[in-house]
Image (cartoon, helix red, strand yellow):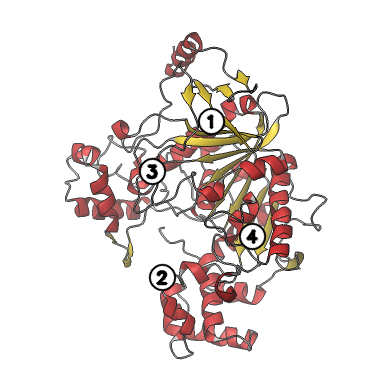
């Protein structure tokens, strides 16, 4: 008898029928596939925070996650679970971090609502599904959907590739964080109906690193069938880290820890705090950067690059939205280097050379921008070119690949500027999150002018919910949004006026298309 079969029989013997739910007048209770949980009602929505979907990873560090041992006593699901260990952050952190959160308008009521599962950003290094900005109350209420947010292992705990250095000991270490997400989506599949959702209509959406994790899962055989629609917001993963480069990074990290690769017990037991300190190690491929952690072409979780040399066939049928913001790098770079807001023409080429992340003559880039946009200042050209060269190209690669494949794809650009500091930040990285969730009053939101912000929030959140519900972002409250094709490259612009455009920023796209796209971390 298989291990999974034995576990299923044991769980069935210990627990009442999975899926039982009680919403009554008291706190709502649900029997999950692992055990019963009790949430609470907030603003008419039933909320379950800190629901365990995986066992404590501290004792199985770097391994593929396991389901928790089943429980019979009702577990409180009223507070967020711990975030993964990471640098900074105020929330509690622990290797025991495999928790998720659910917001639903109804329990076991036969409504079969679409499920919108959000994967947080922070590259592969930081963040959690517990951020106030990701509170799913309003999205669940306004769109009649079930919202899920997830915590999973990050940085070295989730992506340190030890397999070649310690053969047979940690075979899944390079993609442990991705395996966590697979386990979370299996939980969603198994429990969606009990929370009033439809396991056949699960949409994953995520911003920045969250979008990259989704792009990676679209090429991961283990993720096949676990989600039915996807939306990525300023997050792409065209290529994963190659195994040789991932091994070099693992050696650099172990050197920072002063750990011998021939002694795997040492890395398995080193204190988590010491692991976090070592994240400051320099990347052996680019010592101007901290050591990179991200998905690895390990021939287990990933047997091909996510979107190279083409779009993955396993997800060609999945409807997908891809989006970016107009001014990605105004915060990504400008917050760290505020002096760039005073840059002049003489210093512009050197600054671009440091930040475009592609091998192109910066002087030629400046000349091309000045010819195309003679009214722009050096500051405007810097952030536009850095955005086009660094932050936008991956989306073009993925959207074009899906268009060539004939996959159902829609593209947007978010243009509505944040009003902070007189609008100097434009529409920066992360600006669209608050709009999709309807949380423009939450910490971390970047709202624009009030009337336009309310309209755009309604439009974009409606489009995301429509994709989850019907497989298309088009709905009555939005202008016609055709699928993305080459060479037209139809793109919805969410801004002071929401409208369709053909190949917006076409001059910039063509300029950077003359050099190969190389994903950082590959």
Identity of the residue drawn at 37% across and 38% down: 172
**Mark earlier in primary sequence (3, 4):** 3
Is residue 216 found left or right of 315 in the rendered image? left
**Mark earlier in primary sequence (1, 2):** 1
Distance in Å between CA atoms under marks 1 and 2? 39 Å
Return the x and y of residue 485 as percentages of the image width and height.
72, 60
Is residue 408 in view? Answer: no
Return the x and y of residue 234 as percentages of the image width and height.
56, 59
**Mark earlier in primary sequence (3, 2):** 3
Q: Is residue 378 above or below residue 131?
A: below
Return the x and y of residue 374 as percentages of the image width and height.
63, 89
Residue 400 marker? 4
User: Outermost residue, front direction?
Assistant: 25
**Mark earlier in primary sequence (2, 4):** 2
Reading the image, the residue beneath label 3 is: 84
Assign a secondary structure to mark 4. helix
Residue 151 marker? none
How many numbered marks have been drawn onto this rendered protein structure?
4
């Amino acid at each position: 008898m298989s291990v999974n079969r034995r576990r299923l029989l044991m769980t069935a013997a210990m627990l009442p029928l999975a899926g039982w739910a009680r919403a009554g007048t008291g706190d709502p209770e649900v029997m999950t596939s692992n055990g019963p949980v009790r949430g609470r009602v907030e603003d008419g929505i039933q909320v379950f925070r800190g629901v365990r979907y995986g066992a404590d990873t501290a004792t199985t560090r770097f391994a593929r996650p396991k389901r928790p041992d089943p429980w019979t006593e009702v577990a409180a699901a009223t507070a967020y679970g711990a975030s993964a260990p990471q640098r900074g952050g105020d929330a509690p952190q622990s290797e025991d971090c495999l928790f998720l959160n659910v917001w639903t308008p109804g329990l076991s009521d036969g409504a079969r609502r679409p499920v919108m599962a959000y994967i947080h950003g922070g590259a592969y290094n930081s963040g959690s599904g517990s951020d106030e900005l990701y509170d799913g109350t309003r999205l669940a209420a306004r769109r009649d959907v079930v919202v899920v947010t997830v915590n999973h292992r990050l940085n070295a705990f989730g992506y340190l590739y030890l397999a070649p250095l310690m053969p047979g000991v940690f075979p899944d270490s390079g993609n442990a964080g991705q395996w966590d997400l697979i386990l979370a989506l299996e939980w969603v599949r198994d429990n969606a109906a009990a929370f009033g959702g439809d396991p056949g209509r699960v949409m994953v959406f995520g911003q920045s690193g969250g979008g990259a994790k989704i792009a990676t899962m679209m090429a991961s055989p283990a993720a096949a069938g676990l989600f039915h629609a996807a939306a990525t917001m300023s997050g792409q993963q065209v290529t994963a880290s190659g195994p040789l480069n991932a091994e070099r990074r693992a050696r650099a990290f172990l050197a920072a820890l002063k750990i011998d690769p021939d002694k795997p017990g040492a890395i398995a037991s080193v204190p988590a705090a010491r692991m976090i300190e070592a994240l400051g190690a320099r990347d052996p491929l680019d010592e101007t950067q901290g050591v990179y952690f991200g998905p690895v072409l390990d021939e287990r979780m990933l047997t091909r690059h996510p979107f190279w040399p083409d779009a993955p066939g396993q997800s060609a049928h999945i409807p997908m939205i891809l989006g970016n913001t107009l001014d990605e790098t105004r915060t990504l770079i400008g917050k760290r280097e505020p002096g760039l807001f005073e840059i002049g023409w003489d210093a512009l080429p050197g600054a671009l050379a440091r930040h475009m992340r592609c091998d192109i003559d910066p002087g030629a880039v400046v000349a091309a921008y000045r010819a195309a946009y003679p009214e722009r200042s050096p500051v405007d050209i810097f952030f536009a070119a850095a955005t086009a060269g660094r932050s936008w190209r991956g989306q073009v690669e993925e959207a074009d690949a899906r268009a060539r494949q004939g996959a159902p794809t829609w593209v947007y650009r978010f243009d509505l500027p944040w009003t902070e500091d007189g609008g100097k930040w434009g529409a920066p990285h992360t600006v669209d999150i608050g709009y999709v969730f309807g949380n423009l009053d939450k910490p971390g939101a970047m709202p624009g002018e009030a009337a336009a912000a309310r309209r755009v929030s309604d439009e974009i959140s409606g489009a995301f919910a429509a994709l989850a519900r019907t497989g298309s972002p088009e709905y009555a409250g939005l202008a016609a949004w055709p699928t993305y094709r080459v060479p037209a490259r139809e793109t919805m612009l969410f801004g002071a006026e929401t409208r369709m455009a053909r190949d917006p920023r076409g001059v910039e796209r063509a300029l950077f298309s003359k050099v190969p796209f190389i994903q950082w971390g590959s």
